[in-house]
Amino acid sequence: MLRKAGIRLEKVAKTMIEIENVHKHFSTLHVLKGVSLNVQKGEVLSMIGGSGSGKSTMLMCINGLEPIQGGTIRVDNTDVHAKSTDLNKLRRKIGIVFQQWNAFPHLTVLENVMLALRKVLGKSKAEAEAIAVEQLKHVGLGEKLKAFPSRLSGGQQQRMAIARALAMSPDYMLFDEVTSALDPQLVGEVLDTLRMLSQEGMTMIVVTHEMRFAREVSDRVAFFREGLIHEIGTPEQIFDSPQRSETADFLRSVL
Amino acid sequence: MMQTFFDTSLTLNDLWFMLKGAGVTISITFWAVLGGSILGLLLGLGRASAPWWLNGPIGFVLDIFRSVPLLIQFVLANSFKSIIGLNWSAFTVGCVVLAIYTASFCTEVVRAGILAVPPTTRRAARSLGMTWGQDLKEVVFPIALRVALPNWIGLTLGVMKDTALISWIGVVELLRSSQIIVTRIQEPLFVLGIVGLAYFILCFPISRFGARLEARWREND
Amino acid sequence: MDYTFQWRAAFRALPDMLWGALVTLEVALLSMVLGTFLAILLAVASGCRFRALRALAISWVELARNTPAMFQIYMVYFGLGSLGIFLDSFLALLAAITFNNAGYLAETFRGGLRAVPGTQMRAARSLGMGQLQAFRLIVLPQMFRVVFPPLTNQMVWAILMTSLGVVVGLTNDLTGVTQDLNVRSFRTFEFFAIAAVIYYLMTKLVIGSARLMAWRLFRY
């Protein structure tokens, strides 16, 4: 039995995201110039940097929304950009929340969250509803189930988008500047939700401008500049004693 | 030469006849659009600033002209003019009806153009010290024009196509002239093909120009 | 003015005219349903990579929009006739109006498709939906809301366009019936005035029902 356990241990799938020497072009613009990064299960990684540094693009490449021209991205040992990969199936494992939440306007909040559960995971209406209600309560939208997104504030819509992605029980959550489009007073509620998720052990990659949040919540922080990771380390390393001058310059300009 | 190559009974005279028909088409379009646009402009300006009790009835009356087939409007106008003993030609009746029809649409075009100017923009202009007249000329007019012009061009083309209906009350414009020829030489496909080409040549460049204008203006926003 | 209006004769003919109005609605509705279906095909074809299909679609649309409806009816009735395809007035009218509708609505649908932000598709795909699935569940419903007002307008146009059936001899739509009565009694003004009122009421009916439908369907 011990031998069986040993064999099973070896067969356990790697749960991590491996990004290796990724290059990406937008026609002539070289946006990612050889990014390498590994994200372990349970880790919270923040990506900071100026606009155009490639961090949001990096996120889009991880779940295959954007193609890459060089390098590999592996999620749980599956090559994201291989022709044989079933992207639809892979995307069930990777949740992503966008800056502009992209709520489905013609569906209620509850229906927004239930849709993929029913149509992608094939769950029954009752099952999907139960999961959706639970997730929405989790993010604090229990009172707004029957409302249409147009009636919600930006912060509420963003939380709905988070619940929508979480309902799929993903292994990884990607957040692309999810508070940048919000009014200042609504940013807090969304960051609270993210904080809660990190405490629950979700693997998260967060692209953000909220430095205080990044420092508080992340296990590691990666500083992006001109399509490369210039520096990566713990929050203390990056914020308190940056090794590269570009990092220090950037931090000085935003803090 | 045409006879040996195409094997048709269409003569040069016939082509000249159709050309005259085309002239009538363009002429009706011109008068109708001219009269209709002026009337539409006045009514549109009026409606954009008129009180509700004036706006309502005017809107109601104009709406009637948009909700009854043009063919029937021509017939009614023609028979009405005979009833009251007016000595107008069918051509004149056609122009008048088409002008009122144009005006009913033009009013909305103008009104939409004016309403497209955000009041906040006008307020900004006035706060900078512009007079009411300057505001109208430098701010309202250009913005309204950008919205109204493409629509107006579309309206004009629509009117040009609608002139074909005037044949029902006896005016010989392009389509009717072609029909007269077809009854003689019995080559409907060929003659209609020429007519279709003629309408296409009249309409297509103008509509493309309007689309390009619209695109160019939208780019600059 | 030595003309006495004789409205009683006109009112007596009302039932016949109302039957004609029903035929008008029938033609308009049919042409809209067929036209919408064709328009969607045209909208898709005008963006596809197969050049011949794209050329065909664009030609159809431009021809429909740059020539008079009356010309199109003549073409279908007389033009096809010379090729040996003889359509009766009803079918010719239906075919011509459908052709016309399809052309105009193709532009409407293309615009409608553009109006739905690409980010909606992206959000749907990132939840794991397939392309067709995402299109059907997310893009199409939103597109429908955008195209609804133009569709309503086109329906009104279709109703008004059916009046052209009379130029190719149609006698059972509203205008055809009215013209028939006119020819037999020479009470042109009275009969056509009542026909005008009926057309007006029909268009108002269509716009009213459309508004009701919109209120029920697009509660967001």
Image (cartoon, coloured by chain):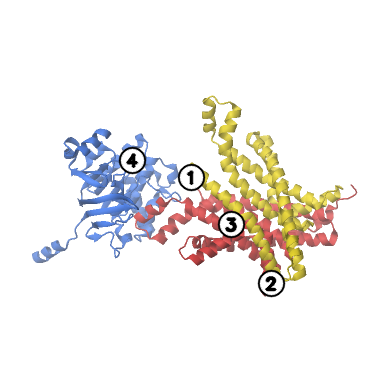
Chain colours: A blue, B yellow, C red
Examine the rendering and report whether any part of residue B5 can be seen. Answer: yes
Residue A179 - label:
4
In x, y percent, where is residue C22? 69, 60
Q: CA distance from mark 3 to mark 1?
A: 24 Å
**A100 vs C17: above or below:** above
Q: Residue C131 falls in which quadrant of the image?
A: bottom left
Q: Is residue C8 left or right of residue C77?
A: right
Quick check: marks 1 and 4 in contact, CB under 8 Å? no
According to the picture, the residue beneath numbered tag 2 turns out to be C81
Q: Residue furthest top?
A: B129
According to the picture, the residue beneath numbered tag 1 turns out to be B219
First reached walking from the N terminus: tag 3 or tag 2:
2
* Nearer mark to the viewer, of 4 and 3: 3
Depth check: give the residue in front, B206 or A162: B206
Q: Chain of mark 1?
A: B
* Residue beneath the point at 33% across and 54% down: A66
* Nearer mark to the viewer, of 2 and 4: 2
According to the picture, the residue beneath numbered tag 3 turns out to be C104
In x, y percent, where is residue C133? 41, 60
* Nearer mark to the viewer, of 3 and 1: 1
Q: Chain of mark 3?
A: C
Q: Assess disc 4: are there few (<14), some (14-19) or many (≥20) residues with their C-alpha within 10 Å of its C-alpha.
A: many
